[in-house]
Amino acid sequence: MLGQFHDLDLQLLRLFVSVVECGGFSAAQGELGLSQSSISQQMARLETRLGYRLCSRGKGGFKVTPKGEQLLSATRGLFESIEAFRHQSNGVAGRLIGEVRLGLSEALDQSVLQRVAEAIRRFRERDQSVRIELMSAMPGEMERLLLQQRLDLAIGYFSLAQSAFDYRPLFSETQHLYCAAGHPLFDDAADDQALQACDRVDHPYRFLRNDEPFQGDLCSARSEQVEGTLAFILSGKHVGYLPDHFARSWEDKGLLRVVRRAGMSFDVAFHLARHRAQVPGDAQKAFEEDLLAAFS
């Protein structure tokens, strides 16, 4: 009776199948490259391991016993399973598995989203079985999630001062200072005195706010999201910075106007960030490659 299963048992079972398929010990010599006596010894060893007879030889020729027939069927099923396992394990060796978690900044331009979609298309054409999670968040929140290793990658405008991160430049967007219909600057030129009298919308990210050319002292509005900034501006009581691609449709409708396009605008650099201490898996590495290729 078989207890623990060893490689030797597999060898003996393969020999048994070959003997049966060849029709006897003598006929299997050429197939196995063994002498008849060696085949007989190994068959006897297998029968001893099992505790029952597998075949008989006599005047009537080679014959498999009923128990031998049952073992033959079971052995063939075993070898089929081993072969299937071999194919599957070889397939897994080259397949990307797991998950990729990507953070995206809010209110991205359509062209940026198209590039992200291109990266996803490239990745899906690989040999992979990967779950991709996209999350939209503010830069500060994405940095926190990266530090907690709850994101693998993030696209946004960052301080670039976080030593725990690697940053790869992707693109930039232009931000203009806007006012809306009903604001004193909407129909009149913005001289320095009039501009300084404006109540601006404060952006909470100091690293971004410091780049803003307009630094008026009057500031009674604060918003983290561009949608909130837009609402303040549309009230006609505040001026504030918005990405030009986000404000364009409102400007086309005549509801927004750029205040001093020359001298009051600035560019914001967007980067792909990841945590240096987080060792990326093959799936994360491949997706990062596809993102960089899509933005190249």
Image: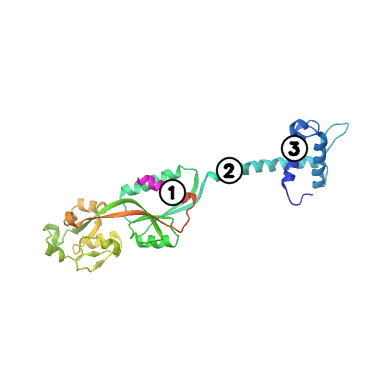
Reply above or below: 31 against 66: above
**What amino acid is labelled 1 in the image?**
Phe
- The residue singled out by tag 1 in the image is 287
**Image side of residue 125 versus residue 16, left or right:** left
Q: Taking 66 as reference, is 273 above or below it?
A: below
**Mark 3 highlights which residue?**
17
**Where does the magenta region start and end?**
284-296
Residue identifier under label 2: 90
Q: Main secondary structure of the magenta part?
A: helix
Q: Quadrant of residue 276?
A: bottom left
In the displayed structure, 121 sits above or below 255; it is above
Image point (29%, 64%), residue name: 206
Quadrant hosting residue 221: bottom left
Q: Which residue is depicted at the point 73% across and 48% down?
A: 6
Closer to the observer: label 2 or label 3?
Answer: 2
Comparing marks 1 and 3, which lies closer to the viewer? 1
In this orientation, which residue lies closer to the viewer: 294 or 249? Answer: 294
The kind of residue tagged 2 is: Asn
The dot on residue 167 is none
